[in-house]
Image: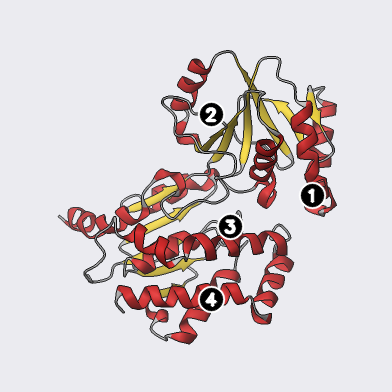
Amino acid sequence: MVLAERLALLQYLRKALAAYDDAFKAIVQKSYIHNKWFTVENTQKALYHIQTNYLDESKLKEWLAKYDYGAEKPPKKIGIIMGGDIPLAGFHDLLCVFLSGNIAKIKLSEKDKFLLPHCVAIMQAKDSRVGEYIQFVDRVKDFDGIIATGENANTRYLKSYFGKYPNIIRESLNSVAILTGTETPVELKALGENIFRYFGLGSRNVSKLYVPENYNFEPLLEVLHEHKDLVLHDKYKNNFDYNYTLIILNNITYHANGCILLTENKVIPSRIAQLHFEYYKNPENLVAELQERKNEIQSILASKSYDGLRMISFDENNRPALGDYLGHVDTMAFLERVGVEIKSIET
């Protein structure tokens, strides 16, 4: 299968996502029953992003032009251990392996077992050769390289087991936002989307705010209250109540609006239904701190630029482009190197 054929199959999948027929709706519902964090609304958002940003033909061609995948090469077997924090979290990894002409051997997350196999089945119904390039396995073995996304608790295991092979092993990351107190309601609303989308479970979700001293939280809390319906979701509400109880019992100072709890904390990751914040005195020191902690951060959001930091606007983070790689590791460049690294290991 040549690159042009693989691109054509992805356009066929894109049309299927746009059509969103009864079979697709049934799979989305089945996924929700299996994992209540995967609400129909959130899965539809994930599917729409894939359709409009990852499968747009012109964007794909522009992205691929940066890499040397025009000439067909003998395929390598790439194991993919997928994350399951948000719906179709591993789609981009599969896209990279498939477009590079390699064979994907996929171990699905227990949290997300139905959506990706349905997408692959759509392409395979169009071209049976897809089954040669995309395989779902219970255990990843007989591979040339590995791409793994896991919780921080199990990345040590992944590194010890797969570390001798060419690999990308990602730890859990989070995103942060720098506020000045001059943000507009539109900007704060966009920030709210970055906090609450997918219940805050993704690496691109903002889990911590950096705010100036004497910051007035009221405008922010008022805008974030637009997401109050989240507490109607049982699992989110249980987390909110549990965290609220811990805060009260431990006499921790907090800000709240009925759907989110804000507590001062230097740690970047926060619990579900909770958001950390930290005061800063001057931007220069804050930039230095964030540079030191860059390995903990996926994205830094702000309404202004800061020298020395790669910033994105509040409305960009939930629309990552094809080249916005998780963990800032270029997956396509890694796949180009796999053959070379294998030879190095063998010698």
Q: Which quadrant is home to the C terminus?
A: bottom left
**Image vertical order of residue 68 relative to residue 30, above or below:** above
Q: Name the residue under label 3.
A: 84
Amino acid type, residue under disc 1 in the picture: Leu
- The picture places residue 233, in percent across and down from the top left corner, at 81, 54
- Residue 302's tag is none
Q: Residue at horizontal 21%, vertical 69%?
A: 71
- Of the two numbered discs 4 and 1 in the rendering, the one whose residue sits closer to the viewer: 4
Picture mark count: 4
For marks 4 and 2, the one nearer the N-term is 4
| Other residues around mark 4 within 10 Å, as few (<14) / some (14–19) / many (≥20) | few
- The picture places residue 254, in percent across and down from the top left corner, at 78, 25
Q: Mark 1 points at which residue?
A: 230
Q: Mark 4 points at which residue?
A: 15
- Of the two numbered discs 3 and 2 in the rendering, the one whose residue sits closer to the viewer: 2
- Of the two numbered discs 2 and 1 in the rendering, the one whose residue sits closer to the viewer: 2
Q: Distance between the residues labelled 2 and 1?
A: 29 Å
- The picture places residue 246, in percent across and down from the top left corner, at 80, 32
Q: Is mark 3 on a helix, strand or loop?
A: loop
Q: Are marks 4 and 2 in contact (CB under 8 Å)?
A: no
For marks 2 and 1, the one nearer the N-term is 1
For marks 3 and 4, the one nearer the N-term is 4
Amino acid type, residue under disc 3 in the picture: Gly
For marks 4 and 1, the one nearer the N-term is 4
Judge from the rendering whether residue 93 lies leftward or rightward of residue 115; answer left or right: left
Query: Which one is in front, 266 or 216?
Result: 216
For marks 3 and 2, the one nearer the N-term is 3
Q: Distance between the residues labelled 3 and 2?
A: 32 Å
Q: Are marks 3 and 1 in contact (CB under 8 Å)?
A: no
Q: Residue at horizontal 54%, vertical 51%?
A: 319
Q: Mark 2 points at which residue?
A: 304
Q: How far apart are marks 3 and 4 (CA)?
A: 25 Å
